[in-house]
């Protein structure tokens, strides 16, 4: 009988840990919009963009700062997310942050805030990287 209860208790305990992720309040410090999307490829020295807008948001949670990326195929950006406003967030780990937009949670990914990740739109990069590139604006 003990063998049956051990797995059941383990499942219940792990479910409690997952549901215990707390919602925190974050202040939106800045929003950087990339209206044209990423640089998909280059035609000579001219960048060709993929046309999928995305937004980099800087959030302050206590003493920590996060730069998260909100991707939108249509360019939609929630009107509740204004610079200086408080947003409820949930940080489950593994590079993800859920932002509250009313009664929905929007999944975003944590990105580095380093400008070294961007590519100047004036000329192709010297090193070729796999996948689309983020333009420096």
Image (cartoon, rainbow, N blue to C red):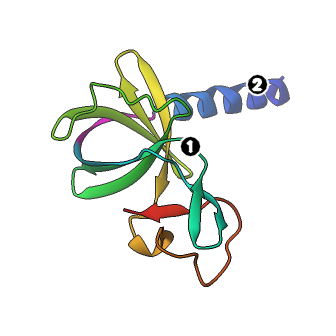
Q: Does dot 1 land on a helix, a strand or a loop?
A: loop
Of 56 and 27, nearer the camera is: 56
User: Residue 76 at what x, y percent from top left?
Assistant: 43, 28
Residue 35 % position (x, y): 43, 44
Q: Earlier in the sequence, mark 2 or mark 1?
A: 2
Q: Which residues are magenta?
A: 21-27
Side of 114 relative to 79 (left or right): right
* Residue 110 x %, y %: 47, 53
Up/down of 114 relative to 84, above or below: below
In front here: 45 or 98? 45
Residue in the picture at 64% in, 72% down: 44
Instruction: In the rendered structure, find residue 51 and report the number of the disc placed on it.
Output: 1
Say whether residue 115 is magenta. Answer: no
- Considering only vertical position in the picture, is 55 above or below 112? above
Mark 1 Cα within 10 Å, few/some/many (few <14, many 20+)?
some
The residue that appears at 36% across and 23% down in the rendered structure is 101
Q: State the residue in front, 73 or 102.
A: 73
Left or right side of 50 for 115: left
Q: Which residue is mark 2?
A: 5
């Amino acid at each position: 009988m003990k063998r049956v209860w051990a797995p059941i208790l383990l499942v219940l305990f792990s479910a409690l840990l997952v549901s215990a992720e707390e919602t925190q309040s974050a202040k939106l410090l800045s929003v950087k919009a990339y209206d044209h999307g990423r640089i998909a490829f280059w035609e000579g020295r001219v960048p060709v963009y993929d046309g999928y807008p995305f937004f980099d948001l800087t959030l302050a949670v206590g003493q920590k700062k996060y730069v998260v990326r909100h991707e939108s195929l249509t360019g939609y950006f929630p009107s509740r997310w204004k610079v200086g406003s408080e947003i409820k967030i949930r940080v489950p780990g593994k590079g993800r942050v859920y932002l509250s937009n009313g009664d929905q949670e929007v999944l975003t990914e944590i990105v580095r805030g380093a400008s070294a990740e961007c590519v100047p739109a004036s000329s192709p990069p010297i090193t070729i990287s796999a996948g689309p590139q983020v333009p420096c604006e």
